[in-house]
Structure formats: C-alpha cells, structure tokens
Amino acid sequence: QIQLVESGGGTVQTGTSLTLSCRGRSNSRYATGWFRQAPGKEREFVAAISWNGVRKPYAEAVKGRFIISKDNAEPMVYLQMNSLKPEDTAVYYCAATTPGSPPATLTSPYDYTYWGQGTQVTVSS
C-alpha cells in the first residue's frame, strides 16, 4: 500500500509559477504520474517519471512549461509548473504504479494503482 499526499496547490496569476509536491513511500520502485481534472472534463495525463528517473513523458499541453523531478531520499516527486495559463486550472492528482510492476506506459491512468486526494490549482487571468 502506498499513501500519496499532494501539496502546493493554490491560486496564482497567469504567467507565474507553482510547484506541487507528492510524498510517497521510500525504498519502493514505482513510477509516479501527475494527472489533472478540470470541472466538466475527464482526468488527463500531465507528466510522469519512472522509478529510476530515466523516463519523463509530458503531455503536449505542458511540454516546455512543466518539469517533473524526484528525490528518492525523501521520497518526493515534484511538478514545477511555469508560465501558468488559465487552462491549467484543475485539481491535480499524484498517482503511483504498483511497485516492481513496470507499467506498459506512463501516460494512462490505468497504469496507476494508488492515487492521492488531489490539490486544487487555480490560475486567474
């Protein structure tokens, strides 16, 4: 069982930056992904990082603006969000795969077993 706790959400203005954090479980080999869900829309993939940090896929909508990173010693995964836009407004969820079970992809929500409670990000224009 992996309990994930997100933090760092808030309300910011267009063009500014915000960093989300996701605390997981140490000494476990799992990939971590960030997804988001806006009101009235389906949950969508944002970014992910493999357990060894080698694979870091991004959604096209955030590529070049968001950066995902991890600190295994903590263990923490971060999502640095730059040049924020109103369309980035959503609840952001952190998710983890089953340890020791490499996922087929890192971009599908079906690859992930554990989910955090979500943190709200609101970008005002």
Image: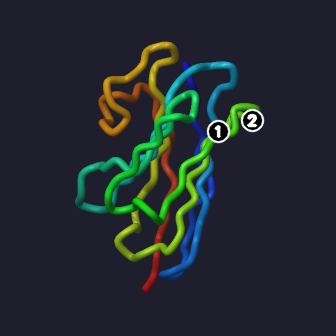
Q: Residue at x 56, y 24 (%)?
A: 2
Between 117 and 21, the one nearer to me in the picture:
21
Give the spatial CA distance, label 1 vs label 2. 8 Å
Image coords of residue 63 (percent x, y): 40, 59
Q: Residue furthest front?
A: 54
Q: Residue at x 76, y 32 (%)?
A: 73
Quarter containing the C terminus: bottom left
Which SS class for mark 1? strand
**Where 56 sits versus 122, above or below?**
above
Figure label count = 2
Image coords of residue 54 (percent x, y): 53, 34
Labels 1 & 2 near each other (Cβ < 8 A): yes
**Could you say which disc has been placed on residue 117 in the image?**
none
Say left or right for 42 vs 90.
left
Say left or right for 112 vs 72.
left
**Where 111 sits versus 71, above or below?**
above
Between 97 and 4, the one nearer to me in the picture:
97
Q: Residue furthest top?
A: 100
Three-letter residue code for mark 2: Glu
**Could you say which disc has been placed on residue 74 in the image?**
2
Three-letter residue code for mark 1: Arg
Quarter containing the N terminus: top right
Classed neighbour count for the residue bearing mark 1: other residues with Cα under 10 Å, few (<14), some (14–19), many (≥20): many
**Where 124 sits versus 112, above or below?**
below
| First in sequence: mark 1 vs mark 2 | 1
Q: What colouring method underlies this structural image?
A: rainbow
Which SS class for mark 2? loop
Tell me the residue that label 1 is attached to: 23
Between 30 and 86, the one nearer to me in the picture:
30
Quadrant of the image occupied by residue 105? top left
Q: Residue at x 65, y 26 (%)?
A: 25
